[in-house]
Image (cartoon, rainbow, N blue to C red):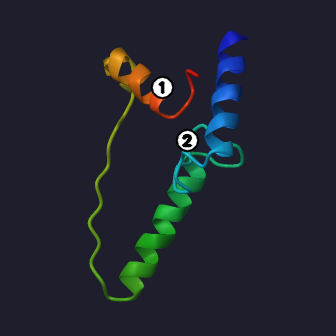
Amino acid sequence: MLEHIIHSHLTKHFEQFYILCDKQHGCRKKRSCESQLLIAVQDLAKTLDGGELMDCILLDFSKAFDKVLHKRLLTKLDYYGVLD
């Protein structure tokens, strides 16, 4: 329950102040990994159809939060006005 409340408040704050870029799909309403994948495949097809080259980098951020320096995370949250 607490996690849901925190997520809702952070999401509202980030959307209100346009903190997340439009290309961010994870953990956002009406967006998902699937919607991001569809856009990536569409961009790839468009590039290949145009005879252009494209570089792709795939990253796996599983368990990323476990590896985050929490002091740095708190600094960033403060910078974006979350901790005010």
User: Is 49 positioned to the left or the right of 2 in the image?
Assistant: left
The residue shown at (55%, 21%) is: 83
Residue 6 visible (yes or no): yes
What residue sits right under mark 2 in the picture? Answer: 26
Query: How far apart in space, not on screen, are marks 2 and 1 (Cα)?
Result: 22 Å
What residue sits right under mark 1 in the picture? Answer: 78
Q: Which mark is residue 1?
A: none
User: Is 48 positioned to the left or the right of 28 in the image?
Assistant: left
Q: Secondary structure beneath disc 1?
A: helix
The residue shown at (55%, 41%) is: 26
Residue 75 in percent (x, y) is at: 39, 24
- Above or below, 41 against 9 in this view is below
Q: Residues within 10 Å of mark 1 (few under 14, many from 20)?
A: few
Residue 33 in percent (x, y) is at: 55, 46
What amino acid is labelled 2 in the image?
Gly
Q: Earlier in the sequence, mark 2 or mark 1?
A: 2
What amino acid is labelled 1 in the image?
Asp
Quarter of image, res 47: bottom left
Q: Quadrant of the C terminus?
A: top right
Residue 38 in percent (x, y) is at: 55, 61
The residue shown at (26%, 66%) is: 55
